Amino acid sequence: MAHGRILVVDDEDSIREYLAMMLEREGYEVQAAADGKKAVRLSSKESFDAVITDIQLPGMTGIDLLGAFRESDPTVPIIIVTGHASQESAIEALNLGAFYYLLKPVSNEELKQVVRNALEVQRLREENVDLERALHVDSERNMIGESEGIAGVFDLIDRVAKTTSTVLLRGESGTGKELVARAIHAASSRSEQRFVSINCAALPETLLESELFGHVKGSFTGAVRDKRGLFVVAEGGTFFLDEVSEMSLAIQVKLLRVLQEREVVPVGGTKPTKVDVRIIAATNADLEEFVEKKQFRPDLYYRLNVIPIAIPSLRERSGDIPLLVNHFIEKLTGGEKTVSDDAMAILTSYEWPGNVRELENIIERAVILSDGSQITGESLNVSIFPERLRKRVLSTTSTGDLGVSGITLDELERRYLLQTLNGVGWKKKQAAEILGINPSTLYRKLQRYGMEEQVEE
């Protein structure tokens, strides 16, 4: 049976009643109006998926009605069915956005097909609106890193992508959990299907439930039509559930059913719908602690934790910072700006509690605010870092009591170099790796500060 709400507008009782009866037999829900003003009143109270109207109507023509709908609901398909056609009216109707223009007498099959086409167009429009929020495709970004920790993640992505198993991504905010999920999807056999994502912490419980599982008309106030949930939208593809720890226990029960039975039941509904979706969940919380505190269902935890992937924080792979910095600058400027050695030393010394996301934001700010073709340490400290971050940078570089109060940036760099070299027993290659600079750059800096043969102070 077909589904959809249709408004029929015609001043002839027999035609109006016949069209309503025919469409209801097809499974549509139909409202009828004898004139344009009544049609406008009906549309102000409830929504319709399509409108069928004559041109010759008392008080308001079908063209006027078409214009009124374009102001109040510009997406609803309007089908003109008239026995008083003219070239001018047809052109005007189509210019105003009429979906189709039919001449009476029209066959039942032709009208049914036009209605089906109109409803399919409307369904796709609504789906696109949903996906604009649910899909966050960023084709320009990719994963950068050479450190041991991130290399291990890359290896797991390649292995996991070949399976259909559920994956649980764990890591701090800003480490790139969604990038990992997208990489798994892109390398999988589902890559030609949709990647759908949702942040479970961003929506209140009732709205999250509706977004995930859908709802049937009348299931709650404001549910004026059936809505497909994102599990159904993601059919055949991958569904990324970010911040899964923020789900309520009630929604956790429904998610468990999806994982166990591979079916969803919409809010207010009783009939389950089978779904074929690969689930990738992510969290920055300690789920084991949540389970102990009875804030997260243990059976759901075990269902999600089939293949766990731990994503390292940026401070755990600080050697990747220069690669990331250069990548972001290339992305933002096309290589028109560079980063000085002293600026890179500052960037690599900071612990980045916001991880890669925070680093990218700082680089974008640096590109915008720094003068000239190079981002220097002086400009970075003075104008790029917010005050709270500037304090953290100085605190980080002063580990071991560097004594940064009232000193120049050169002296700060000299002390930081000395501390790093002392920490690795003056193994310059290892120190250069920690600092994120080439050994030759380190050697020039040591010459500059007269530290070639310096020993621990």
Image: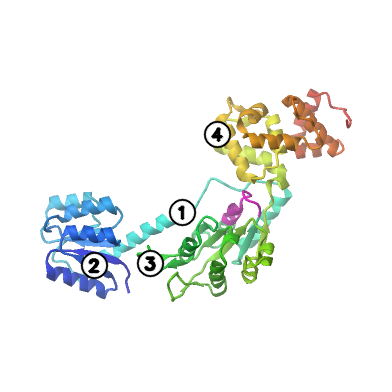
Q: Give the alpha-carbon distance from disc 1 to disc 4, as whole Å.
A: 28 Å
The residue beneath circle 2 is 31
Q: Position of residue 206 (x, y in %)?
A: 48, 63
Label 3's element?
loop
Q: Work out whether 25 lies above or below 228.
A: below
Q: Position of residue 49 (x, y in %)?
A: 30, 62
> Which amino acid does the dot numbered 2 rest on?
Gln
The residue beneath circle 3 is 226
The residue beneath circle 1 is 133
Q: Position of residue 424 (x, y in %)?
A: 84, 39
Q: Give the alpha-carbon distance from disc 2 to disc 3, as whole Å.
A: 17 Å
> Which amino acid does the dot numbered 3 rest on?
Asp
Front residue (pair 255, 128): 255
Badge 1 local density, few (<14 within 10 Å), some, or many (20+)?
Answer: few
Front residue (pair 21, 373): 21
Q: Give the alpha-carbon distance from disc 3 to disc 4, as whole Å.
A: 46 Å
Precedes in sequence: disc 2 or disc 1: 2
Label 4's element?
helix
At a point 28% along the width and 60% down the height, the residue shown is 45
Is residue 329 visible to us here?
A: no
Q: Which numbered disc, 3 or 4, marks the residue closer to the eye?
A: 3
**Which numbered marker is on residue 386?**
none
Apparent side of residue 434 relative to residue 424 in the rendered image (left or right): left
Precedes in sequence: disc 3 or disc 1: 1
